[in-house]
Image: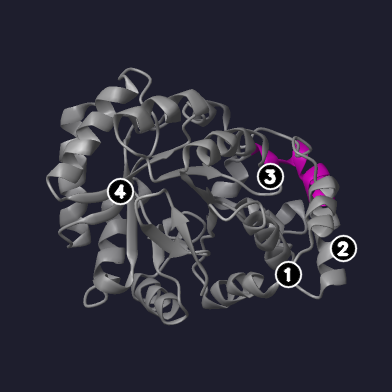
Amino acid sequence: MPHRRLGTAGLSVSAIGLGCMSLSGVYGEADDDASVALIHAAIERGIDHFDSSDMYGWGHNEEVLGRALRGLRDRVILATKFGQTQNPGGPNGINGTPAYVQQACEASLRRLGVEVIDLYYQHRVDPKVPIEETVGAMQRLVEQGKVRFLGLSEARPETIRRAHAVHPIAAVQTEYSLLYRQEAEETRATTRALGIGFVAYSPLGRGFLTGAIRDFSQVDGRRAAHPRFQEANFAANRALVGKVEAIAREKGCTPAQLALAWLLAQGEEVVAIPGTRHLGRVEENLGALQVALTPEEVARIAAAVPAGAAAGLRYPPGAMKAVYA
């Protein structure tokens, strides 16, 4: 398993990790025992980067991941996030106050059953709290030995620069795939310049780039709320996926493997955390590491799905207010 560095202070993770959100029923019903078995199988196949959040299942995800890692803690890089709060009937709230940072971290440590979190992210930037205050509180967690490295999720370039001036940021996590590129590529220009690692979540376009979703009738659950899966946008985005499928056939790989190989070819500081509940998908995703792309092929793939070509917002309108902040 190839590893890549996140930041400049020694953090290294598997080039392909596992995003754990779907283990809490987000994209279909999940079984905790099956989730634990999946995590164990992923570790055996060389994955050591596991990404959770206190928002996934509102604590459930961290509990399942903690259960799976008992006796295996020294084999993994454990990442989780804080900052989103429950707001029944509306978009999630955001809390980046120093007191909440401390409270949220201690709650995550209890649920995970560990003494230290390897990589701790602010999940969403709180517009009401200066980023310097939030990161200052996160820095105190490092000083207390509760966190090793700090990260930000969905932060815009100027926010990243301000945060990094308070304490080194090891990684920035942003949605990034062939279908979701513009904000991520703007962010990457900043993270590259600052020596910060880039963690791509939803690198398969929430399943679109696997090629498994071929017809609008197959869209259900959480995906149905996302504009790019809605009927007005579905056909245009499915046509883009068709271009990826055609190139994948030429390369003798799956569309998912091509999409991941393209993403990893963007730079040595880029890692991916595709999420799934299924071992077959984990193994398929790892197959992307065997797909070699020439610079010309990387450019051809990018030209087939140009930045900004996807139809529709990447989140529902209410949630869009909390990203790239």
Q: Is residue 266 left or right of residue 315?
A: right
Residue under label 1, please give it: 292
Real-space Cα separation, disc 2 to disc 4, in angstroms: 40 Å
Separation of marks 1 and 4 at Cα, in angstroms: 31 Å
Task: Name the residue: 53% across, 36% down.
Answer: 193
- From where the camera sits, is residue 29 visible? no
Tag 3 near tag 2, CB within 8 Å: no
Instruction: Locate residue 75: give its quadrant.
Output: bottom left
Magenta stretch bounds: 227-240
Whole-percent x and y of residue 202? 56, 51
Marked residue nearer the N-terminal end (1 or 4): 4
Q: Mark 3 and mark 1: span between their CA atoms?
A: 30 Å
Looking at the image, is mark 1 or mark 2 nearer the viewer? 1
Q: Earlier in the sequence, mark 2 or mark 4?
A: 4
| 142 is higher (above) or lower (below) than 245 | above
As helix, strand or loop, the secondary structure at mark 1 comes to loop
